[in-house]
Amino acid sequence: MPADGWTLISVLLSTIPLEASLAATLHQAALDLYRRDAGVQAVGGDVMTGRVVNLRKTLQLGAAMGSHGRLYAYDISDKRLANLTPRLRRSGLSNVHPQRIAGENDTKVKRLRGKVDRVLVDAPCTGLGTLRRNPDLKSRQTESGLAELNAKQSAILEAAGGLVKPGGRLVYGTCSLLEEENEAIVERFLAAHPDFSLVPCAEVLARQGIEIPGCERYLRLLPHLHDTDGFFAAVMQRAA
């Protein structure tokens, strides 16, 4: 970690992109997590992103760092990494380093175990938060498919939690409305890891000057209340 004390963020293995209109909200919360001193303008440190199919996320994080530090764009797909290259070139960012990994247990990921200050998990999910734009998603879901996704979500969160250093934070997000993919995954993780505790979402967003009614513990955006796609995020902190 650099001498200036800035943090390390990891974004692990998502297979469904978060709705673009909501991604900015999550990014604001995530970026706030690693800005330890609002008076400092230059952001240094190492950042690792896994799965860059939503290229805006990688480029936004790189730009928010002011092109300082290192942002590792990890993905299991050569094609998605190839798609990143021309946009990365146009962005002018010098801190993004695309790399292919086999999965969340790749040695490139494991080498960061216990060393990461901030981990952002953009989790694979059913995408049911986007039903009003993609109504056919509902007919594609099965109980066995959901169970398989839940197992994958838990495995990814487990791997991500292992990267967090004492005192670090872990952010888990989906674009799903289902409790089975959201609160249940987070609460199961917290029950198995007493060294992690939930950080109220309202507290995190307040530091960005954002107030969302009904989002005290978790960030839960609902189409009928917030006029957005459905979206969920939770922030957890590891004991120092």
Image (cartoon, rainbow, N blue to C red):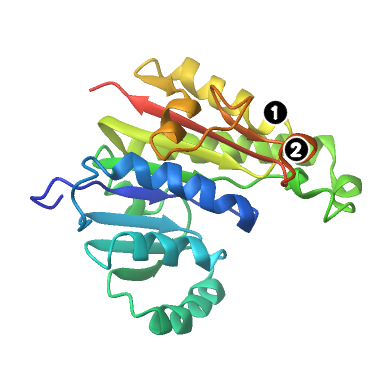
- Is residue 238 visible to the viewer in this orientation of the structure? yes
Q: Work out how far the residue at label 2 is from the one at label 1, CA to CA, in angstroms.
A: 8 Å
Image position of 40 (left or right of 113): left
* Residue drawn at the location 36% of the way across and 42% of the way down: 32
Q: Quadrant of residue 144?
A: top right
Closer to the camera, 22 or 169? 22
> Do callouts 2 and 1 mark residues in contact (Cβ within 8 Å)?
yes
Q: Secondary structure at mark 1?
A: helix
* Residue drawn at the location 46% of the way across and 49% of the way down: 27
Above or below: residue 190 compared with residue 7: above
Q: Which residue is mark 1?
A: 180
Where in the figure is residue 99, as x and y percent of width and height?
A: 38, 68
Image position of 68 (left or right of 230): left
In the current view of this chain or complex, which residue is farthest to the left? Answer: 3
Of the 4 image quadrants, the one containing the C terminus is: top left
* Residue drawn at the location 55% of the way across and 21% of the way down: 188
Q: Which residue is mark 2?
A: 146
